[in-house]
Image (cartoon, rainbow, N blue to C red):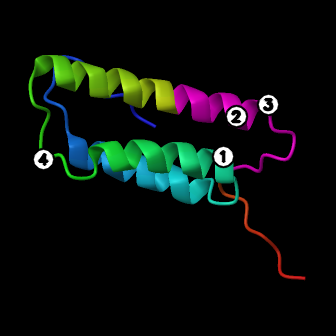
Amino acid sequence: MEKQPDHEPLDLVEMRRQLTVLRSQHSENLGIASLLNRFLVKIAFLSEPRDVAHAQHLRSEFARTLQKVEAITSRSPSAKPSGAVKQPK
């Protein structure tokens, strides 16, 4: 996922899109889905950050969320590549 540069305006639509894609890729992992859902709820109704400090806070929280997802997927022995498709039985 792309980290948004600090000097550009915060694009909440793009942030939500990236989080939604990531959630879809890890839909079988409830821990990741829950983590992403919690952050999505925080930004769901924002049209823009209140001020520069709020934008910086959202950027850092977004980065922390992505790091947590990476940590969960790296320690999970059953983690599948994002392109994996479940085979029907």
Residue 30 lies in the magenta-colored region: no
Q: Is residue 73 visible?
A: yes
The answer for how far apart the CA atoms under marks 4 and 2 are is 30 Å
Q: Residue 35: give x, y in percent of width and height.
A: 54, 42
Name the residue at 56% across, 49% down: 34
Labels 2 & 3 near each other (Cβ < 8 A): yes
**Above or below, 86 relative to 56:** below
Going by the numbered disc 1, the residue's amino acid type is Gly
Label 3 or label 4, whichever lies nearer to me, is 4
Labels 2 & 1 near each other (Cβ < 8 A): yes
Label 2 or label 1, whichever lies nearer to me, is 1
Secondary structure beneath label 2? helix
Secondary structure beneath label 4? loop
Q: Is residue 5 visible?
A: no
Q: Which residue is mark 4?
A: 47
Q: Which mark is residue 72?
A: 2
Label 3 or label 1, whichever lies nearer to me, is 1
Going by the numbered disc 2, the residue's amino acid type is Ile
Q: Which residue is mark 1?
A: 31
Going by the numbered disc 4, the residue's amino acid type is Ser
Residue 79 lies in the magenta-colored region: yes
Q: Which mark is residue 75?
A: 3
- Quadrant where the image shows the C terminus: bottom right
Q: Residue 80: give x, y in percent of width and height.
A: 77, 50
Tell me the crowding category of disc 2: few under 14, some 14 to 19, or many 20 or more residues within 10 angstroms, Cα based.
some
Tell me the crowding category of disc 3: few under 14, some 14 to 19, or many 20 or more residues within 10 angstroms, Cα based.
few
In the foreground, 84 or 53: 53
Q: Residue 17: give x, y in percent of width and height.
A: 35, 52
Going by the numbered disc 3, the residue's amino acid type is Arg
Q: Earlier in the sequence, mark 3 or mark 4?
A: 4
The answer for how far apart the CA atoms under marks 2 and 3 are is 6 Å
